[in-house]
Image (cartoon, coloured by chain):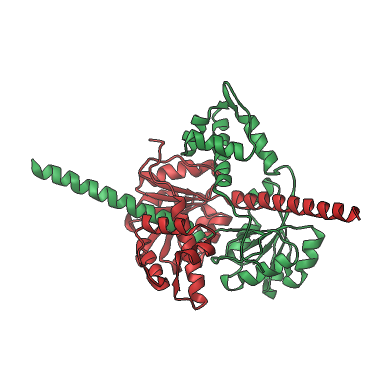
Chain colours: A red, B green
Amino acid sequence: MKEVTKYIIKNSLKRIFLYRACLSRLKQMGVDKVFSYTLANEAGVTPAQVRKDFSEFGIKGNKKGGYEIDELLSKMEEIFHRSKDHNIVLIGMGNLGQSLSRYSKFVQRNMNIVATFDVDPFKLKMRSEIPVYSMTRLKEIIDRFRVKVAIIAVPEISAQEVADELIRHGIKGIVNFAPVLLKVPSEVVVNNVNLCDELESVIYYVQKILKSEGLKNIELLYKDMKY
Amino acid sequence: MKEVTKYIIKNSLKRIFLYRACLSRLKQMGVDKVFSYTLANEAGVTPAQVRKDFSEFGIKGNKKGGYEIDELLSKMEEIFHRSKDHNIVLIGMGNLGQSLSRYSKFVQRNMNIVATFDVDPFKLKMRSEIPVYSMTRLKEIIDRFRVKVAIIAVPEISAQEVADELIRHGIKGIVNFAPVLLKVPSEVVVNNVNLCDELESVIYYVQKILKSEGLKNIELLYKDMKY
């Protein structure tokens, strides 16, 4: 198996999602049109960055009076195949897996978890809206529903093995919640989502904020003492 | 409330977490030392990027024979205050909130959810290892446990209101799972984690992969036809 991946989730794509969220918020506020500098300000980037990202993803529509928000949003829908249904399998019906299998936002955005899998025989009997299958039926279900995308929510010790099996059965994209970096062939894309890292990065900045507030308080104290 | 945030989760910090994961994997494989180009290769970035990121976060330790992996990892522990306990509150005990409240990896990394909150009286009576409180007790609990970090897992409609309240009570950092961009004052940091976006970004690349494979197949077919 080759260890170099050709497809990585680019930061420009993440920014496009951020712009989309900003545009939705502006739309809710009753705004119809935006200039790139308004959107840039909302998203916390430069206007040049917005224009560069739009150009990378083929998003047009800048006119004299700015971009039409509806036009931008529907162009984004088109790029991200939002109108098409996408079948997904989920591996690992532990705590996090169960929660993801019930996450209603996925369905609202045409992303359907058609089946879930677990190695634990007890899990196969659990009550669940989406069927829970044994791993032995993985290939059959992937083939039947023409699944190309999988979510991994198994313990880190088995994540690589599960990924290898998914890829053998034709899966091309994986969202991996196991806190381990997966090695995949170059024609497969992996998005590693590490919930601890997300929390830890906030803690890192909070420490900085508290430190800077502490310093400010000391400065104020020092200023008081001079009088 | 000012709308410009001074603290955003930088990509360099995200790469540091990626390096950490790569280093852990290398260590498990029995490797003691790495050169920046080995680490860069593992992480899919350039060696110059690795050195630049290390320098930004004050990570030293490059010697003639490369970096000592253990030294790098303990330096990272130090930077991210891993040895210190961090108390966290979680707002919203729906499907996702319950799953996050039980996520054992947080505790393993010294991030303790000390209390959870919900507006639903039914949720207050549920069986849970971590206590579930009414929102009226938010300030009391935040004060008692000196909490500075919160996780928001409420519906998008109430996320901003909850964030405002948390910030009024002294919260400095928020991990937000509601699919909405929060507006916070400049001395607060927010990390918006959008699970739909994580899945959608994989789908975007899978479409590209399938298209490029389709083109390859057509090329092969065309090649065959010439004979």
Q: Is residue B78 above or below residue B192?
A: above
Q: Residue at x 78, y 54 (%)?
A: A216
Q: Where's the N terminus of chain A, which quadrant?
A: top left
Which of these two is toward me, B148 or A19? A19
Q: Residue at x 35, y 64 (%)?
A: A60
Q: Where's the C terminus of chain A, which quadrant?
A: bottom right
Residue occupying the far bottom of the picture: A30
Which of these two is toward me, A24 or B120? A24
Using residue B203 as the reference point, say whether residue B54 is left or right of it.
right
x, y percent for residue A89: 43, 56
> In the rendered image, which quarter is residue A66 located in?
bottom left
Using residue A215 as the reference point, say whether residue B128 is left or right of it.
left
Residue B32 visible? no
x, y percent for residue B42: 48, 35
Residue occupying the far front of the picture: A227
Residue B145 visible? yes
x, y percent for residue B93: 64, 66
Q: Is residue B140 above or below residue B121?
A: above
x, y percent for residue A151: 46, 53
Using residue A2 as the reference point, say whether residue A179 is left or right of it.
right
